[in-house]
Amino acid sequence: MSGHISFFDSVGNYVDKAASFTDIPPGLIEQIKACNLVLRLRFPVRVGDDYEVIEAYRVQHSHHRLPTKGGIRYAESVDQDEVMALAALMTYKCALVDVPFGGAKGGIKINPSKYTIGQLESITRRYTTELVKKNFIGPGIDVPAPDYGTGPREMAWILDTYQAFRHGEIDSIGCVTGKPVTQNGIRGRAEATGRGVFYGIRECMRHEDDMKKVGLTKGIEGKTMVVQGLGNVGSNTALISQREGDVRIIGLSEREGSIYNPKGIDVEQLLAYRKANGTIIGFPGTEHIGGPLAALELECDILVPAALENQITSENAPRIKAKIIAEAANGPITADADPILIQKGCIILPDFYINAGGVTVSYFEWLKNLSHHRFGRLENRFHHDQFNGFVNKIEEMTGKTVDKREREFLTRGGTEIELVNSGLEDTMITAYNQIRDTLKDHPNITDIRTAAFVCSLKKIASDYISMGIFP
Ligand code: NAD
């Protein structure tokens, strides 16, 4: 934790700061900040010849929209405060990107690498059973997703356990998102958070006047990036930024340490190297510069902390040289480090905006599950025929022939992945421009985090007011 303040309290402090720029009644702000439901669980799991008591949580932070939504984390750091803080961030995140859910989060206090796959399955199924028994899961109640230490495999176990209890429930496949594509998941979910991080940074860097203020030219292309954490979010951010944004990845860090190559690191090859060798250290062409925190201090244009919270503190903040920090992880900058970085003129893209791609595509998956058909299935053939008609007409009117490849491109309907990625791109661009407009409307707000909280608070408050709960 940062200094003396807990993670949950630090989220509350950011909200208070933002609330002072709105006319939302203080009582309503208190309701918005409060965690509505906290489930604290202890259950036994058989490990070898004995039993182990597992500590777990599920927190539903806000019910102003239903279902509630948020990932499940498997980590030794999990405690009630952390899960409450992450659930609260989900509420503000969903509101910011217009995903109609309340915020939630789950956590199991384990180090997954210490258990066999069979034991992890038992833990996941037992946890899901507890959630079913307490009515804490369901497509209209609370919908978990992957987070740190979990992925599609765990989501498939959750779905299967839920369905065993709720046999015949027509929408049961919507009880969890981030499932494997073959188990009612959606294409593009696995890389959605990292892809969203890329779209968010790219949109931020499109604005010439904003970039001038930090001494950068506009555009993401050719800029240097450092990424901490090469799990789901970090590896996809690095890969997509390199492939689609022409970004130069000069530094990377994992648990085993940090590596650096000012000429750029090929991320795809590096990931293959880590898979084969169990480490990033020793990757050809790179220099080993220190422990997992060393990369954060490299001179670069964009820094992406994508591991866990509390990585940039008041201790190392004065040595951070990045011009833009994209908080791909939740809470990587502590509350006392934040003003130090702002003072230095750093642009901070806050977690509940920049990592919202995951929940956005989870929302698309949930919509797909409730509609019981793949996006594009109904309209693809129709659009294909319609576009063919247009091309025929253009050929007839101009007397020219459109070549075969061009015709194929112009007449195809969108595939699921194309529709998902375009919906994600639009969401990240729209939300960024809402935040930017809020900054313009409030000249006294000096940072993006506060402006983003103002956007979210206004939307949540208007929901409460329209429910008639607050006049
Ligand atoms: P993950 O488990 O897939 O990956 C985390 C990676 O960080 C692992 O490779 C781990 O070895 C590495 N790591 C751990 N400690 C480190 C350290 N000190 N230095 C460098 N690397 C370290 O987790 P993830 O899903 O990628 O989540 C990462 C962060 O992103 C978390 O804060 C999570 O809450 C947030 N997030 C995830 C999603 C999602 O869709 N998965 C969505 C939004 C936010």
Image (cartoon, rainbow, N blue to C red):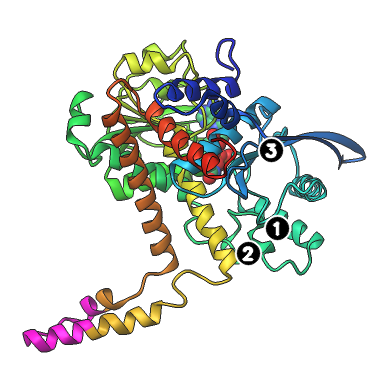
First in residue order: circle 1 vs circle 3? 3
First in residue order: circle 2 vs circle 3? 3
Vertical placement of residue 402 versus 458, above or below: below
First in residue order: circle 2 vs circle 1? 1
Vertical placement of residue 152 versus 334, above or below: below
Residue carrying label 1: 159
Q: Amino acid at mark 3?
A: Ser
Quadrant of the rendering where the C terminus is positioned: top right
* Whether residue 207 can be seen here: yes
- Residue 182 is drawn in which quadrant? bottom right
Q: Residues within 10 Å of mark 3 (few under 14, many from 20)?
A: few
Q: Amino acid at mark 2?
A: Gln
Residue carrying label 3: 113
Q: Main secondary structure of the magenta part?
A: helix
Q: Residues within 10 Å of mark 1 (few under 14, many from 20)?
A: many
Residue carrying label 2: 183
Q: Amino acid at mark 1?
A: Leu
Q: CA distance from mark 2 to mark 1?
A: 9 Å
Q: Which residues are magenta?
A: 390-407
Taking the magenta stretch, the answer to whether it contains residue 405 is yes
Disc 1 is placed on an element classified as helix
Quadrant of the rendering where the N terminus is positioned: top right
Which residue ends up furthest to the right in the rendered image? 49
